[in-house]
Amino acid sequence: MNKTMSHSKSLYILPILIGLGIIFGTVTSYLQISDYQQQLSQSYKDEINRILEGVIDKGENRLQTVSNSIIALFESSNEISYDEFTTFSDRIFSSNSELVNVSIIDENQLILYSYPQSEMIGENFDILFPSHPTQINGIQTMNLEFSMNDLRKLIISVPFDYFISHDTITS
């Protein structure tokens, strides 16, 4: 009888051990796969961040070049005529088609020069554009401000999605 009971116990212990082994193996595999998926997801996010940073840096560099050029124009002479400003701005726009407008404002926020939207000259910048995003010629824009000197500022208007457009990131 003892032999039968120990034999029947061993019949139950073996399947229980096999079942526990399968459960343990399944849980371990699930945790490893889950960890791997998280690592892939983080790697993908890091790659997207690097791409977006590159796109933003490229856009910033282009705008910095534009601002440096226009500021240099005004630093090269005591007085710039509107025709000189227009001719120079036209050249800037021909190689930077994403620009919407450039303006020079004084310390009182009065627009002194504006291209290509010359009708904005004489207007108060803060009254003309009280909120963001602003709208110029039906295009939602953001206005980037660059100091020229204590009395003037350069405003470069670009489309609101200039740095990260809807086409940059696919679903």
Image (cartoon, helix red, strand yellow):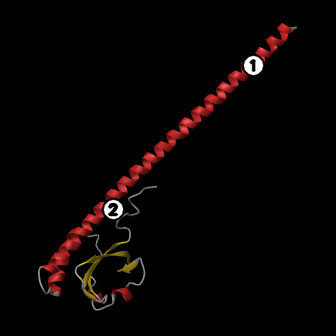
Q: Is residue 96 visible?
A: no
- Amino acid on which the number 1 mark rests in the picture: Ile
**Front residue (pair 108, 63):** 108
Label 2 or label 1, whichever lies nearer to me, is 1
- Amino acid on which the number 2 mark rests in the picture: Ile
Task: Name the side, left or right, on which 19 lies relative to 165.
Answer: right
Give coordinates of residue 76: x percent, y percent: 11, 79
Q: Earlier in the sequence, mark 2 or mark 1?
A: 1
Q: Determine whether 27 is above or below 138 in the image.
A: above
Task: Identify which residue is drawn at 34% across, 86% down.
Answer: 125
The residues bearing labels 2 and 1 have C-alpha atoms spaced at a distance of 64 Å
Give coordinates of residue 145: x percent, y percent: 30, 76
Numbered circle sitting on residue 56: 2
Task: Identify which residue is drawn at 38% across, 59% down.
Answer: 168
Give coordinates of residue 61: x percent, y percent: 26, 64
Q: Residues within 10 Å of mark 1 (few under 14, many from 20)?
A: few
**Front residue (pair 151, 105):** 151
| Local secondary structure at mark 2 | helix
The residue pinned by badge 1 equals 13
Task: Name the side, left or right, on which 47 lies relative to 15.
Answer: left
Q: Determine whether 165 is above or below 120 in the image.
A: above
Task: Name the side, left or right, on which 94 lies relative to 164.
Answer: left
Q: Quadrant of residue 8?
A: top right
Q: Residues within 10 Å of mark 2 (few under 14, many from 20)?
A: some
Give coordinates of residue 75: x percent, y percent: 15, 79
